């Protein structure tokens, strides 16, 4: 058994150091150091990170970097990019970085270079994309395709859906995209009601091709298509698959010629760079897809080469560890001031919580410290009129990442200035707060006095000291988005290394799949023998009696 990171010298030093900073206000740190903004900001791959509004000093950062050294982060970064089996519980590499290896240098898995197969599938994706976009690919009745429906869930849904939403401006005007993920027939039915079978292409996206929701939705979509077009033959022109499981795709009834492959060393939530990105390539075209890859590649290079003190993912990861383990923060807010990133918080929720929601180390030893926080968020401006109240005056520490575009993808006079002023105002106020003396003075200026003024002060005081990282970029482009996604992928990796976790497995997700499959025959009355717990058994009886 390896020693837990909580036994390290840096951990002990950070625990002590936290006591010195526990009651320090960030606003006072700014008063003490006029260079704080310059000192604590850094640029890479088109992203500017200002992390000066955090409860930290140079000493904090030095100790956090020491923690990363003790966790052997440098070595782990080499393992990750080299294709070592960093996913030890499944004995697999995690090579999402190979999919965007623009230098095309060999990367070996079990002694075999994976780049030729990556390039070959990319080539097939490109040819197929061009055929659909150039209207050469025809449906069963001879019409060209104008609707793409992706059927997948989790990692086979969230990434492509988020990217297409973010890059809608680059979308081909001749194609409309839909995503079906939920097994509730409402999802599929509402989409089927809007589309024309003659001009629709379904992409069944499933790494394992065993996921209940996806297969059920795909079967229903297939049945609908055959009914509508009156022929089984129609499936060949209207269904393609993306998977690692060729035989299962064939068993489903999709020609392997219409299947795009990826490999077990691509994790579901890390798969948008692979054939799982087919709906993205169809929507924005091959060149823009390549720009997305290039942005991620640039960030990959930065992650591998920059010193820890100037390394964006390292800094973001270490800062989160600082709050989670030394300030007991249990949450991380993602607040984009860029409406195109509407789905980014949901995407990150999976990336972070599936990767870091673990309680034993790689070696199976229980940890004695907190791990991945609860990640959530929404576009910042909407959040201000909803949940920010809790950030300003509630009782929880809520570190936030605030993402800001300098320019909108859709400029309208006066709007972006309003976006920027809101973003900066919120980050400022969350940090600065307003103490009782300041509040009293404001209220006096407004004419307040006596007992009522005293009462008002308590209600209108803001503790402040809520930390934030500001991530600024010019306009959201495929390249910037690629870099932004890679930034968070690597941030998660940094944390996993420091906490000693395997970020690439998801046994909790697998358990959910197994239990749902075991309950299905019980609910349908096929199998009455399986006992769960008294509540579940009672619910099964109730459902059976009332349906
Ligand atoms: C992602 C997870 C999970 C997975 C879905 C869909 O990392 O493993 O979200 O992507 O359960 O799985 P399939 O792609 O195998 O259908």
Image: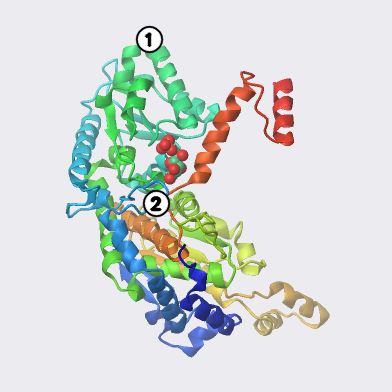
Pointer 2 local density, CA inside 10 Å: few below 14, some 14–19, many at least 20: some
| Above or below, comparing residue 198 to residue 513 in the picture | above
Horizontal relation, residue 463 to residue 230: left or right:
right
Q: Is residue 158 visible?
A: no
Looking at the image, in which quadrant does ligand 1 appear?
top left
Most extreme residue toward the right is: 451
Report which quarter residue 70 is drawn in: bottom left
Left or right placement of residue 36 versus residue 372 in this view: left
Residue 3 location, x and y as percent? 47, 68
Q: Give the vertical position of 147 relative to 416 (above or below).
A: above
> 533 or 37: nearer the eye?
533
* Disc number placed over residue 88 in the picture, else none: 2
- Image quarter of the C terminus: top right
Task: Find residue 221 and report its horizontal and vertical position in percent.
Answer: 43, 22
- Is 530 placed left or right of 88 in the picture? right
As drawn, the residue found furthest toward the front would be 1
The residue tagged 1 is 230
Q: Give x and y (percent) for residue 121.
A: 22, 38
User: Which of the marked residues, 1 or 2, is nearer the chain's N terminus?
Assistant: 2
């Amino acid at each position: 058994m390896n020693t837990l990171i909580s036994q390290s010298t840096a951990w002990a030093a950070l625990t002590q150091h936290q006591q010195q900073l526990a009651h320090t206000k960030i606003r006072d740190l700014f008063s003490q150091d006029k260079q704080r903004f310059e000192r604590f900001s850094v640029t890479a791959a088109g992203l500017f990170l200002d992390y000066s509004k955090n409860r930290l000093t140079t000493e904090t950062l030095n100790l956090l970097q020491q923690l990363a050294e003790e966790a052997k982060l440098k070595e782990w970064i080499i393992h990750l990019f080299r294709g070592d089996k960093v996913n030890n519980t499944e004995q697999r590499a995690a090579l999402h970085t190979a999919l965007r290896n623009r230098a095309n240098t060999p990367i070996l898995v079990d002694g075999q270079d994976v780049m030729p197969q990556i390039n070959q599938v990319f080539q097939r994706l490109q040819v197929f994309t061009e055929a659909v976009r150039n209207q050469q690919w025809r449906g069963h009745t001879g019409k060209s395709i104008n609707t793409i429906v992706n059927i997948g869930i989790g990692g086979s849904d969230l990434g492509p859906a988020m990217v297409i939403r973010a890059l809608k401006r680059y979308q081909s005007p001749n194609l409309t995209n839909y995503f079906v993920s939920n097994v509730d027939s409402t999802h599929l039915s509402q989409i089927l009601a809007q589309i024309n079978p003659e001009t629709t292409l379904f992409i069944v996206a499933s790494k394992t091709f065993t996921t209940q929701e996806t297969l059920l939705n795909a079967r229903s979509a297939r049945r609908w298509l055959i009914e509508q077009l009156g022929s089984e033959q129609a499936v060949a022109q209207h269904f393609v698959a993306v998977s690692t499981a060729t035989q299962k795709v064939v068993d489903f009834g999709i020609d392997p010629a219409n299947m795009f492959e990826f490999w077990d060393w691509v994790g579901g939530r890390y798969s948008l760079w692979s054939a799982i990105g087919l709906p993205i390539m169809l929507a924005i075209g091959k060149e823009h897809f390549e720009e997305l890859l290039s942005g991620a590649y640039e960030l990959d290079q930065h992650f591998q080469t920059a010193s820890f003190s100037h390394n964006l993912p390292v800094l973001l990861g270490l800062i989160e560890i600082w709050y989670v383990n030394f300030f007991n923060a249990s949450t991380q807010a993602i607040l984009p001031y860029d409406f195109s990133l509407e789905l980014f918080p949901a995407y990150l929720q999976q990336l972070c919580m599936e990767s870091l929601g673990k309680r034993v180390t790689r070696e199976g030893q229980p940890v004695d410290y907190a791990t991945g926080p609860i990640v959530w968020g929404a576009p910042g401006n909407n959040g201000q009129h909803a949940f920010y109240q809790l950030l300003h005056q509630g009782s929880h520490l809520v570190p936030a990442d605030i993402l800001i575009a300098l320019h909108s993808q859709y400029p309208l006079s006066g709007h972006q200035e309003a976006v920027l002023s809101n973003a900066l105002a919120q980050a400022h106020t969350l940090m600065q707060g307003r103490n009782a003396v300041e509040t009293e003075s404001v209220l006096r200026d407004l004419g307040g006095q006596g007992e009522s003024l005293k009462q008002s002060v308590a209600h209108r005081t803001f503790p402040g000291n809520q930390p934030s990282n500001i991530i600024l970029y010019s306009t959201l482009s495929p390249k910037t988005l690629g870099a932004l996604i890679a930034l968070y992928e690597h941030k998660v990796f940094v944390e996993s290394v420091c906490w000693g976790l395997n970020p690439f497995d998801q046994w909790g997700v697998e358990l959910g799949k197994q239990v749902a499959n075991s309950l299905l025959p019980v609910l349908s009355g096929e199998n009455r023998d399986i006992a769960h717990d008294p509540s579940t058994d009672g619910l099964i009886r109730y459902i059976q009696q009332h349906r």
